[in-house]
Image (cartoon, rainbow, N blue to C red):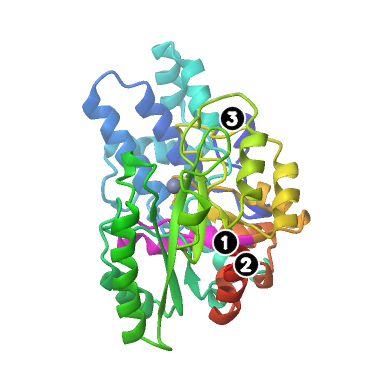
Amino acid sequence: MKRRSRGMSPSTAGGQAPDTNGAIAGLLRDLAAVQTSRQSRWGYERAAEAIAALPAPIESFVRPDGSLRKIPNVGPSSTRVILEVLAAGASPTVQRAIAESGRASEVEKGRALRGTFLSRAEVLAALGSRRLKGVSLHDYRGDLQMHSTYSDGSQTLDDIVTTGIARGYAFSAVTDHSHGLAIARGVSMARLAKQHQEIDRLNRKHTRRFRIIKGIEANILADGTLDMTPAERRALELVVAAPHSALRSSADQTPRLLAAVRARGVHILGHPRGRKYGVRAGVRADWDRIFAAAARATVAIEIDGDPRRQDIDHELARRALEAGCLFALDSDAHATDEWVFAETAVAHARLAGIPAERVINCWPLEFLLKWAADRSGR
Ligand SMILES: [Zn+2]
């Protein structure tokens, strides 16, 4: 299928088979964007989400008689689009709807914001591919970006221990939003002290079985400083610094991110672009300069595995690898069923050819804690 020439979103990642699921999800998003009724827009969006989340290529859902097996949340009009694409590599229905809407340029803009996102089927293909070298799920010891009920997450610290142990992890960092980010119910220093008492209690209870690392997701302000003072940051074992503002700005923000990676006590540059699937491209910057500075400072570059983020993607990650960077592969989970997002991050890392030694989630706990303490100047 010549998807690129037809403008159907995602690229074929790292020479993998074409991502038909991603392409179809993109077309259904296009169709949603030109609907006049809210209900039909919602219907196509829900179908797009269902296709992007399928665990196998859509081709495997076709019955011998050419019809499509029932897929939850995918109705008859979405099914027609899918069958058109499978038959001809394009959907006349979608093309017609776009032409008739007179909103082709808007659709084009949406498409540009969906590049290099992997569908779930593509994630699983990358995880299972023998051709791809580098980090595998087997090497992965723990997640380093995660939110609890102390900020905008729904999981308690107990849930985090239970889920971590069930997944075979040795550790997990809890990185609630810092106090500067009110919109995400940023945690005050007083609440953080309470959280740390609870973590100490849990860590004592699960010694040598599972370790919660005391972390924070600090907010990178417009000038590159963080919303926590260096003294406040010293209360933490792990600081993820991430941008949450000016993510739609077209201005160059290299100085902002350079200041963040050079700030004392930062361990991870979290979701470096702040992009969102189909919504915004995120920060614009000279990434090679940022990666060089991060490599010099031994700050890990994050691949955030939230399917809507996938930030950074495998293409940028390859450049960070060449610059000599360390990486953190995280779920950014706000609920226990989102831990699986770490797999999306691992898939991007595999497509970028990142070896396990460069991934701090794959380091033995003692080594990781020692590195973190050195960086904090503790
Ligand atoms: Zn964040």
Q: To which residue does mark 1 refer?
A: 328
Q: Which of the 4 quarters of the picture holds residue 158?
A: bottom left
Residue 107 in percent (x, y) is at 47, 23
Q: Which residues are magenta?
A: 327-346
**Numbered disc 2: secondary structure:** loop
Of the two numbered discs 3 and 1 on the same chain, state the one appearing first in sequence. Answer: 3
Residue 51 in percent (x, y) is at 39, 47
Q: Is residue 67 visible?
A: no
Of the two numbered discs 1 and 2 on the same chain, state the one appearing first in sequence. Answer: 1
Q: Which of the 4 quarters of the picture holds residue 352?
A: bottom right
Amino acid tagged 2: Val
Distance of label 1 from label 2 (alpha carbons): 6 Å
Question: Label 3: how many residues lie within 10 Å, few (<14), some (14-19) or many (20+)?
Answer: few
Is 72 part of what is drawn in magenta? no
Position above or below: 130 against 310:
below
Q: To which residue does mark 2 refer?
A: 359
Image marks 3 and 1: residues in contact by CB distance under 8 Å: no
Q: Is residue 363 left or right of residue 34?
A: right
Q: Is residue 40 visible?
A: yes
Amino acid tagged 1: Ala
Closest to the observer, 20 or 246: 246
Quarter of the picture containing the N terminus is: top right
Measuring 67% from the left and 35% from the top, which residue is drawn there? 254
Could you say which disc has been placed on residue 6 in the image? 3
Quarter of the picture containing the C terminus is: bottom right
Image marks 1 and 2: residues in contact by CB distance under 8 Å: yes
Q: Nearer the viewer, mark 3 or mark 2?
A: 2
**Numbered disc 1: secondary structure:** strand
